[in-house]
Image (tube, rainbow, N blue to C red):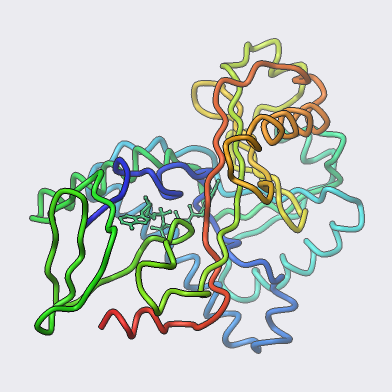
Amino acid sequence: MLEAGPIGFGASGRNGGFCGLGSAKLSYPRMVVRFGLEETAGFIRAQVEAVELVRALGGDERLAFDAQGSGTITVAHRPSRQTELEAEAAILTRHGGGPVALWSRDELRARGYASPEAFGALHQAVGFGLHPLKYLRGLADAALKRGARIHAESPVVSWRSEAGRHVLVTPRGCVRAKRVIIATNGFTRESLHPGLAGTLLPVLSNIVVTRPLRADEIAAQGYTTETPVSDTRHLLSYVRLLSDRRFMFGARGGLDAVPGAIPAQRAWMERCLGEMYPAWRGIETTHFFLARAGVLVGGAHAPYRGAG
Ligand SMILES: Cc1cc2nc3c(=O)[nH]c(=O)nc-3n(C[C@H](O)[C@H](O)[C@H](O)COP(=O)(O)OP(=O)(O)OC[C@H]3O[C@@H](n4cnc5c(N)ncnc54)[C@H](O)[C@@H]3O)c2cc1C
């Protein structure tokens, strides 16, 4: 395994730590219209199994990944969005999405989530929060123990074919392989292989993390839930009160990842955090990161065929 940066440099080490259902932009009712009931039910089951796999693997390998909360919460950020959550809940209940509950604004508040932008919620019992970098490092150790070879700080800078083999060149050496699996996601360099050209659209997402909050600050906002929370925005906000009482706030990124764009993005995130959680307006944030994920936009699977 060749990794350009340190192990966990990509989104897998630096994401929001939501392990739950909801990995598509399309709502379940729309999915049913477009793909049919059977496909949608299969997709829901696959997500439930994925969550179970993450938990089971973590247990089997004894990974310390700070599992946190109970299920996941999706908050209606406008009153009209509660109706959409009701439709989601109906499909999840009928098609194996595990127990779900619809909460009014007051019920949500009673369960430890208060915000001027909360008008009700959907609670899904399947899911939890985790510490992504701890999980990833644990997996890397487990792979090493089973004989995997992992090379950090080893970017593949060129890729050629030689005598029926792929040759992956890094600044410090090269690897010859019969088969190559590309897992570079939003960090993919299109120039690496002709099959990669025009296939990926990187999308940015930002996270800010506050200093640890005091008990009185937590009480002032009425936010005590440790369950991961996202909302019904198309480019959703996702938040977690971490086990050391720091607050993680994630939201859509800008369009530009150049270093000069970062201060404005951070200021925007801090402003949004204050609007959604007024008691924490102006609270110091100690970490900010802007990470990339990738969306396949075209030429689907061509690079994988090319890679043999
Ligand atoms: C801010 C953010 C928050 C997210 N939150 C969540 C969440 O809460 N829950 C969830 O399920 N998903 C979340 N996601 C999505 C999820 O993290 C990604 O879908 C997932 O991590 C992608 O995994 P991956 O292995 O495909 O890519 P990555 O983990 O991004 O790994 C790709 C790796 O490829 C390396 N690389 C690139 N080019 C080369 C090269 N030429 N040579 C060698 N190495 C190279 C990069 O350095 C990188 O480490 C989030 C994404 C972002 C950006």
Describe residue 21's horizontal placement relative to residue 181 as left or right: right
Quadrant in which residue 271 is drawn: top right
Quadrant in which residue 217 is drawn: top right
Figure quadrant of the N terminus: bottom left
Q: Position of residue 236 (x, y in %)?
A: 71, 51
Figure check: 298 above or below 1: below
Describe residue 63's horizontal placement relative to residue 245 as left or right: left
Figure check: 159 above or below 70: below
Q: How many numbered markers are drawn?
A: 0
Q: Image point 70% across, 87% down: which residue? A: 34
Q: Position of residue 247 (x, y in %)?
A: 61, 27
Q: Nearer the viewer, residue 183 or 238?
A: 183
Q: Image point 46% across, 49% down: which residue? A: 11
Quadrant in which residue 193 is drawn: bottom left
Q: Image point 53% across, 45% down: which residue? A: 291
Q: Position of residue 170 (x, y in %)?
A: 21, 55
Figure quadrant of the C terminus: bottom left
Describe residue 170's horizontal placement relative to residue 12 as left or right: left
Q: Image point 77% across, 50% down: which residue? A: 121
Figure check: 79 above or below 209: below
Hey, which residue is sitting farthest right in the picture? 80
Q: Nearer the viewer, residue 20 or 93?
A: 20
Q: Position of residue 171 (x, y in %)?
A: 21, 50
Figure check: 155 above or below 221: below
